[in-house]
Image (cartoon, rainbow, N blue to C red):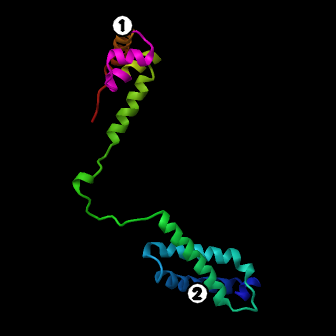
Amino acid sequence: MAAAQRGDKAAYRLLLDELRSWLARYYRRRLPEAHVDDAVQDALLAIHNKRHTYDPVRAFAPWLAAIARYKWIDRLRTMTVHRTEPLDDDIPDYLQIGDHGDTVISAAVLSELLGTLKPGQADVIRLVKLGGHSIDEAALLTGQSPALVKVNIHRGLSKLAALVEGYDDVA
């Protein structure tokens, strides 16, 4: 470390290689395997950032051990906040999540089509045809009369039908 502090790049590279091995052994005895590499990297970064604080007159091992210990404690704190559990390779069928690409595309297309309508028409179509509300409920929610809700639904659906007329759904 003293040579590295004086600017000897080869000595610093050698030091980091040796520290990486020592830190990996240190953390393997104290942490789950999944956290070892991250802990080593955290410690190496801390050593790099604090290298100017090392006093070459003193022993290097206690200085290194203190940094490793503090990083180990930080890692333990992180592990308690972000707990992880291993997942089985075989996920039961009832937990399988299918491909929702078609659903997402359909929702995006529908949203775009509804965006071409007048807001009053789009609102009541969303409420009645997509949301399952009654005509009276849609009238209360939008401030339109029940008759206007029916007219807006009819006109909006007619416009949507005209927009998609002639469209071939290629699957």
Which amino acid lies under the numbered mark 2 shown in the image of this protein?
Answer: Glu
Task: Report the residue at 46% width, 18% height from top.
Answer: 119
**Start and end of the magenta stretch?**
126-145
Taking the view exactly as shown, the residue that stands out farthest to the top is: 147
Secondary element at image label 1: helix
The answer to whether residue 117 is seen in the rendering is: no
Quadrant in the picture for residue 18 = bottom right
Is label 2 or label 1 in front?
Answer: 1
Instruction: Kindly report the secondary structure that dominates the magenta region of the rendered protein.
Output: helix
Which mark is drawn over residue 147?
Answer: 1
**Left or right: residue 3 compared with residue 95:** right
Instruction: State the image quarter where residue 40 is shown.
Output: bottom right
Q: Is residue 119 above or below residue 20?
A: above
Identify which residue is drawn at 68% across, 87% down: 11
Q: Residue at x 26, y 59 (%)?
A: 91
- Taking the image as shown, residue 21 lies to the left or right of residue 127, namely right
Q: Is residue 119 above or below residue 73?
A: above
Q: Out of 169 and 143, give the one closest to the viewer.
A: 143
